[in-house]
């Protein structure tokens, strides 16, 4: 790594390698920037906007912003965290996220972000969309109520599994996750439990059936350490820029 | 047996008095009284006006979610719903529980019994029982108890705390944990966790034993009042172990009529609907369960500690069994049929729970690692448990996609619906008939309701006060008198 390639993040000097984004360089250097649709194994998507930072005074998504020498990046400031809280509130309001009875609780990225950003109220009137489950597959359950449209499953199924099981349909507030089958049902696809698409859902949409609450409280992913610490563990380190993905490990 | 005070012949000519809200199972209820021109009571009804909807919105959800979702019915005894749903799901997955799973669940359940009974007796009812039903309202609360009887108040708090700790260790959280799952549990009890509970358990047993003494002493000191307050005859329903012992986690159903004749015994609850059915009445959202063989008019019954302690053949722990024998023999058995006998029976159960917890903590199966089992998948699951307030029934049907398509819940307070109505009718006859309303008289109605420990008292009683409003209207519907009390006094 060229030692002259650095930028400033909240007053800290962050080294980076050619081709890295601000997000990648920050995580690799041990600095957390809140994010949701970013995943270290996939090409940055830039859709959730949780990772928005100020670069030289202008807001931009840090997961898609190429790192450049001399940038002045601001992230951990109340102005941005207030906007991030609002984004999380909107995601909660748009879907049906009932954490108390959701088996993803404790392992959910959205919930963990809510705690980390101190989202203490709903903020918006809930839309309570009507989204029936797809329980047609013998081993896999789809609970569309919790989808945040991050497209990680779409990307994983297409780019890694080569199956294109998932896609997004519709626009704006009607945008929703669909299954690529004539019937629209998961049972009519060739998805398998071993697929990458089964491992990447940050919320409780794509679930292995009959796992439920088998992991006790206290042993779930975010019970012991907040997402800000977990994300740093998950991120490829500077010496490991190719990146294994701890985020995909250990999640039931 | 519907009471003669259930429906007045000509309500349009009567004056209406409403206690609204009395609050309900974490919601609201009300009591209405119709009085004639001479202030004689003609109609008394306990209305439960809540609508919960869990049976509907659980439909479509995966079956493994039920034990965690439906426990949100209640913040006081969620463990009961958690375990009743889990038992139903055990049937769905065809499981026979491993020793570790069953014992961890039993520990969780008896922790629940301990904390709930302690909460009810010390926090909710002791102000009535120690100060008097119409004592100074400013002191008739747990703060007043703490000032006048600091040691009793402290023991009540610590008994409840211990029960909550048992729940935390077995379920993961003190309220709304996830420990019980279809076919078993998701954790055992570690040596460290066991030792943490063991260091206090002997004290808990001792305090529980002393609590039975307090309940007995109160009864003895006010024998005429306790024997006759809101007294009525009722059939009983409860669960017993195969040998007839008190068992709050599992067993068969036992029903006896008000003369003590056994109607059915050791009945397999997986077909409960053949013996128990639910009636509806236009004036309450709460159903009226009844024994089919006796019909809706005659078949209502009483559940809970009074039924369990009086109808079991014995209690399988020595200290509680000794107390049960004394309870049954007391004054020719008068406490066994008394509404206020509930409190004494409840404390005997709390002592039993403390003994069971102590015994389980010495059982090495708690540290086992064989936590879950499964067998042949079934479409229907029924789980029954003896919750702190009485028999609790969960019934589910699950389709081939693992989604719940039907759910029926008969909770303890529902079983006691008609019985609570009977109790307040008796109190109305005994204390309100022909008299001017006072706060103290109003509280007599609440005392009768509280004896059953319905969730409706738990939900609002944290400061020892139910929010109440009693309105006295004349024949033309004009307000003559109003007594109001908010939840903050």
Image (tube, grey):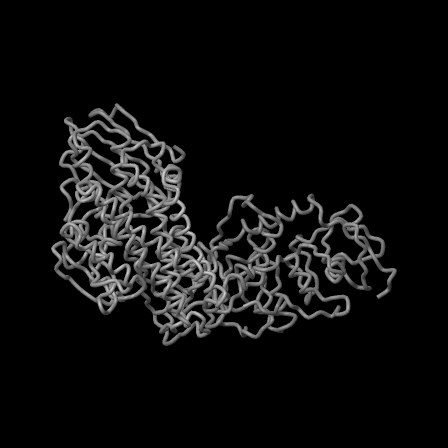
Q: Is residue B278 left or right of residue B102?
A: left
Q: Quadrant of the C terminus of chain B?
A: top left
Residue B328 sits in quarter: bottom left
Residue at left offset 35%, top offset 74%: B96
Where residue B298 appears, as percent x and y from the top left, is 14, 52
Q: Residue furthest right?
A: A4
* Count of number-bearing discs: 0
**In terms of depth relative to the viewer, which is nearer, B260 or A188?**
B260
Where residue A130 appears, as percent x and y from the top left, is 47, 54
B390 relative to B462, above or below: below
Residue at left offset 32%, top offset 42%: B126
Where residue A95 appears, as percent x and y from the top left, is 52, 53
Residue B13 visible (yes or no): no
Residue A206 visible (yes or no): yes
Q: Is residue B237 left or right of residue A230?
A: left
Q: Is residue B321 left or right of residue A198?
A: left
Where residue B122 appears, as percent x and y from the top left, is 35, 46
Residue A3 sits in quarter: bottom right
B267 relative to B422, above or below: below
Residue B58 sits in quarter: bottom left
**In terms of depth relative to the viewer, which is nearer, B430 or A19?**
B430
**In terms of depth relative to the viewer, which is nearer, A231 or B317?**
B317
Q: Is residue A239 left or right of residue A93?
A: right
């Amino acid at each position: 790594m060229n030692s002259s390639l650095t930028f400033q993040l909240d007053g800290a000097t962050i080294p980076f390698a050619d081709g890295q984004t601000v997000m990648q360089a920050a995580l690799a250097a041990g600095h957390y920037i809140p994010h949701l649709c970013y995943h270290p194994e996939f090409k940055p998507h830039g859709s959730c906007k949780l990772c928005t930072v100020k670069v030289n005074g202008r807001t931009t998504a840090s997961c898609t912003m190429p790192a450049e020498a001399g940038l002045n990046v601001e992230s951990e400031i109340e102005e941005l965290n207030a906007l991030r809280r609002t984004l999380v509130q909107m995601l909660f309001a748009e879907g049906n996220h009932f954490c108390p009875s959701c088996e993803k609780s404790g392992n959910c990225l959205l919930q963990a972000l809510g705690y980390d950003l101190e989202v203490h109220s709903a903020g918006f009137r809930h839309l309570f969309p009507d989204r029936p489950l797809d329980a047609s597959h013998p081993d896999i359950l789809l609970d569309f109520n919790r989808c945040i449209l991050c497209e990680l499953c779409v990307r994983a199924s297409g780019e890694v599994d080569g199956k294109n099981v998932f896609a997004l349909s519709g626009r704006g507030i009607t945008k929703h996750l669909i299954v690529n089958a004539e019937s629209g049902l998961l049972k009519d696809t060739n998805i398998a439990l071993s697929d990458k698409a089964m491992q990447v859902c940050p919320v409780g949409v794509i679930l292995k059936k009959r796992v439920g609450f088998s992991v006790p409280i206290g042993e779930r992913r975010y019970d012991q350490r907040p997402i800000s610490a977990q994300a740093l563990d998950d991120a490829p380190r500077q010496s490991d820029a190719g990146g294994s993905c701890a985020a995909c490990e250990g999640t039931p | 047996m519907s009471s003669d005070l259930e429906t007045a012949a000509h309500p349009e000519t009567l004056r209406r008095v409403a206690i609204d809200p009395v609050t309900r199972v974490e919601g609201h209820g009300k009591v209405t009284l119709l009085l004639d021109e001479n202030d004689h009571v003609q109609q008394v009804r306990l209305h439960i006006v809540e609508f919960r909807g869990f049976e509907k919105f659980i439909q479509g959800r995966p079956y493994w979610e039920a034990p965690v979702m439906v426990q949100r019915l209640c913040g006081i005894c969620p463990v009961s719903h958690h375990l009743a749903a889990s038992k139903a799901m055990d049937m769905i997955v065809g499981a026979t529980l491993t020793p570790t799973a069953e014992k961890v669940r039993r520990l969780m359940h008896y922790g629940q019994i301990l904390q709930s009974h302690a909460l009810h007796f010390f926090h909710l009812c002791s102000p009535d029982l120690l100060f008097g039903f119409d004592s100074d309202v400013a002191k008739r609360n747990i703060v007043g108890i703490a000032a006048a009887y600091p040691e009793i108040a402290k023991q009540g708090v610590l008994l409840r705390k211990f029960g909550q700790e048992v729940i935390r260790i077995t379920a993961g959280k003190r309220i709304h944990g996830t420990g019980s799952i279809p076919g078993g549990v998701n954790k055992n009890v570690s040596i460290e966790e066991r030792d943490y509970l063991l260091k206090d358990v002997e004290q808990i047993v001792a305090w529980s034993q002393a609590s039975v003494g307090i309940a007995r002493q109160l009864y003895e000191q006010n024998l005429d009042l306790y024997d006759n307050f809101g007294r009525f005859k009722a059939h009983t329903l409860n669960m017993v172990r195969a040998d007839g012992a008190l068992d709050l986690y599992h067993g068969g159903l036992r029903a006896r009529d008000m003369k003590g004749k056994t109607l059915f015994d050791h009945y397999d609850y997986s077909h409960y609907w053949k013996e128990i059915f639910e009636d509806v009445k236009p004036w309450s959202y709460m159903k009226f369960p009844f024994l089919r063989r006796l019909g809706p008019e005659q078949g209502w019954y009483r559940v809970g500690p009074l039924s369990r302690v009086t109808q079991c053949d014995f209690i399988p722990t020595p200290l509680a069994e000794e107390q049960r024998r004394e309870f049954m023999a007391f004054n020719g058995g008068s406490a066994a049929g008394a509404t206020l006998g509930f409190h004494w029976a409840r404390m005997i159960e709390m002592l039993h729970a403390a003994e069971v917890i102590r015994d389980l903590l010495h059982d090495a199966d708690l540290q086992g690692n064989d936590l879950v089992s499964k067998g042949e998948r079934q479409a229907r699951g029924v789980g029954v448990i003896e919750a702190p307030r009485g028999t609790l029934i969960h019934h589910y049907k699950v389709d081939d996609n693992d989604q719940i398509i039907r759910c029926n819940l008969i909770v303890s307070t529902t079983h006691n619906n008609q019985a609570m109505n009977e109790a307040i009718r008796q109190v109305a006859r005994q204390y309100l008939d022909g008299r001017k309303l006072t706060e103290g008289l109003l509280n007599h109605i609440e005392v009768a309701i509280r004896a059953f420990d319905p969730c409706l008292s738990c939900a609002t009683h944290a400061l020892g006060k139910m929010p109440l409003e009693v309105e006295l209207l004349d024949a033309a519907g004009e307000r003559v008198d109003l007594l109001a009390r908010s939840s903050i006094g």
